[in-house]
Image: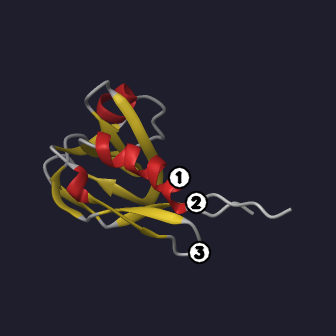
């Protein structure tokens, strides 16, 4: 028997992210909580993000994806090695998503650019 999940169902999951996003941070270690993403492991962050920073669309392979717009010239607060990027929402102190990034040494007082990147939910198989 074939499996099927309508795009609207996947979009519902991705809309959950879109409705809650308020910030993004570059972290030295994979955060598992809001506090770790916004304080403990944070090297640089950008507040004030809204749903306009995220775009829903067809997945590259199948299913659907949400794409984060590029964020440029984010001030580095703490010297360290970037390893992860996290999305979070300040309402409810919620860690929304964590992904890896190209490892890069960051120095306090400089800036970092986070290129556009996406999260994809593939169709059921």
Badge 1 vs badge 2, beta-carbon distance below 8 Å: yes
Name the residue tied to disc 3.
61
Q: CA distance from mark 3 to mark 1?
A: 17 Å
75 and 22: which one is in front?
22
Q: Is residue 124 left or right of residue 72?
A: right
Please tell me which residue is depicted at 40% across the width and 35% down the height of the picture.
95
SS for dot 1: helix
Q: Residues within 10 Å of mark 2 (few under 14, many from 20)?
A: few
Badge 3 vs badge 1, beta-carbon distance below 8 Å: no
Q: Residue 88, how many percent across, how many down?
A: 33, 39
Image quarter of residue 80: top left
Which quadrant holds the C terminus? Answer: bottom right
Q: Is any part of residue 79 visible from this angle? A: no
Q: Is residue 70 left or right of residue 62?
A: left
Please tell me which residue is depicted at 17% across the width and 54% down the height of the picture.
74
SS for dot 3: loop
Name the residue tied to disc 1.
9
């Amino acid at each position: 028997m074939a499996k099927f999940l309508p795009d609207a169902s996947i979009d519902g999951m991705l809309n959950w992210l879109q409705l809650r996003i308020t910030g993004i941070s570059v972290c030295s270690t994979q955060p598992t909580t809001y506090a770790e993403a916004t304080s403990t492991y944070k090297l640089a962050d950008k507040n004030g993000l809204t749903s306009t920073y995220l775009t829903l669309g067809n997945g590259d392979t199948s299913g659907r994806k949400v794409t984060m717009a590029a964020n440029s010239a984010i001030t580095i607060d703490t010297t360290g090695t970037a390893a992860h990027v996290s999305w979070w929402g300040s309402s409810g102190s919620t860690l929304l998503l964590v992904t890896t990034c190209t490892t890069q040494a960051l120095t306090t007082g400089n800036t970092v650019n986070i290129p556009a990147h996406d999260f994809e939910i593939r169709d059921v198989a």
